[in-house]
């Protein structure tokens, strides 16, 4: 459904010095520099697949989604979505996709939500019968009763996001680009949005590319993730495989009834934390059951929990390793340049 080969996006940015002199110089002799937002990114997404697209701020996630939806033209490489070239923005292509950005809105602020829905009905040439059917389905899935006829400015953030999703899906697209759809929402509303996206994918076989800084969104919806950092794709694969490869141990959390020697804890596993009567041990995945049983037999344990290493920590470690590798490459390049000049 989506094929990206060697995608590259470069922005030409105007640089201006501060002050009056800088303003005058910028007027007569403008200076620019190139900023590479996405560099040689390649991946594919199968029909009906839900993919998490992760990366820190400024990594290139939103730029990539805008290229996929045709809002930006690529500087290099090829992009195909549903057998269309997005940059052409053909009507048939626009009927196949939608882009929802948590920090942007398409609903008219001063109108009732249903009035914006009617505008989308006209834009996408949806018949009255089909419109009523789809609006009814979305109203049920998103619990929109009582919201449709309220002025958008009077909706809460969570209510507005649900209406934004309904407006974006009235034409029933089969490719969804979701950019931070739960940003700013409370925990309950985040869960509702996740359930809705999963339900929509299951009902209609939609292909979903999701970016989010909330790892709970990604772990709840996607088995596969793409990780981008400084414009480079640094991981493409199964989320559980990433966890197993990057975190070969589990965390064994113990609550004790009395203090014990650190040496007794170290005999069971790597001590990550010891605060009062609470202990966190790192234990190899294959040894978890044995070590947990040994802890219960040897220590005054009143509570025990076995957890995976947080996905946030694993992804953060992936970013840190990427930055370290780029810094090492830059240092080698600088040393080679200095050596050549010498």
Image: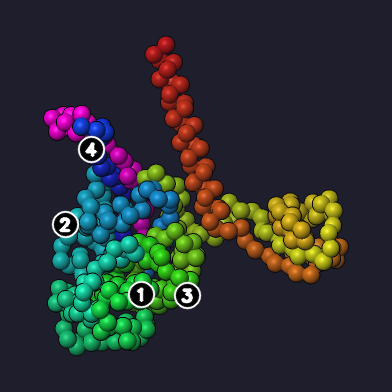
For the residues labelled 2 and 3, the Cα–Cα distance comes to 39 Å
Q: Residues within 10 Å of mark 4 (few under 14, many from 20)?
A: few
Q: Quadrant of the N terminus?
A: bottom left
- Where is mark 1, residue-wise? 156
* Residue ID for mark 2: 88
Would residue 195 appear left or right of 8 to someone viewing this image? right
Say few, some or many: other residues with alpha carbon within 10 Å of mark 3 (under 14 / 14 to 19 / 20 or more).
Answer: few
Badge 4 marks a residue whose secondary structure is: strand
Instruction: Answer with mark 2 or mark 4, whichever residue precedes in sequence.
Output: 4
Residue 173: horizontal and vertical position, in percent? 27, 72
Residue at 30% over, 39% down? 35
Which residue is nearer to you in this view: 336 or 181?
181
Which secondary structure, mark 3? helix
Q: Position of residue 239 (x, y in %)?
A: 51, 59
Q: Secondary structure at mark 2?
A: helix
Name the residue tied to disc 3. Answer: 188
């Amino acid at each position: 459904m989506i094929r990206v080969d060697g995608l590259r996006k470069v922005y030409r940015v105007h640089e201006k010095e501060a002050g009056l002199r800088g303003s005058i110089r910028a007027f007569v002799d403008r200076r620019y520099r190139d900023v590479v937002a996405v560099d040689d990114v390649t991946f594919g997404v199968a029909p009906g697949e839900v993919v998490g697209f992760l990366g820190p701020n400024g990594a290139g996630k939103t730029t990539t989604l805008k290229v996929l939806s045709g809002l930006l033209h690529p500087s290099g490489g090829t992009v195909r979505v549903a057998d269309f070239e997005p940059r052409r923005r053909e009507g048939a292509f626009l009927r196949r996709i939608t882009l929802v950005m948590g920090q942007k809105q398409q609903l008219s602020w001063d109108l009732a939500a249903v009035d914006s829905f009617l505008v989308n009905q006209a834009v996408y040439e949806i018949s009255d019968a089909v419109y009523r059917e789809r609006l009814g389905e979305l109203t049920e899935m998103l619990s929109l009763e009582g919201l449709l006829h309220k002025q958008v400015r009077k909706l809460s953030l969570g209510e507005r996001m649900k209406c934004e999703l309904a407006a974006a899906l009235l034409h029933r697209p089969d490719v969804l680009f979701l950019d931070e759809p739960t940003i700013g929402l409370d925990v309950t509303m985040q869960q509702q949005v996740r359930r809705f996206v999963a339900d929509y994918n299951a009902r209609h076989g939609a292909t979903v590319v999701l970016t989010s800084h909330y790892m709970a969104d990604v772990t709840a919806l996607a088995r596969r993730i793409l990780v981008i950092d400084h414009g480079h794709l640094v991981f493409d694969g199964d989320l559980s495989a990433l966890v197993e490869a990057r975190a070969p141990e589990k965390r064994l959390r113990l609550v004790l009834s009395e203090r014990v020697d650190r040496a007794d804890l170290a005999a069971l596993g790597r001590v990550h934390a010891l605060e009062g009567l609470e202990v966190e041990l790192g234990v190899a995945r294959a040894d978890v059951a044995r070590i947990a049983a040994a802890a219960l037999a040897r220590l005054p344990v009143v509570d025990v929990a076995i957890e995976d290493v947080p996905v946030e920590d694993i992804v953060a470690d992936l970013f840190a390793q990427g930055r370290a590798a780029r810094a090492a490459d830059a240092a080698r390049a600088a040393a080679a340049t200095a050596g050549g000049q010498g």
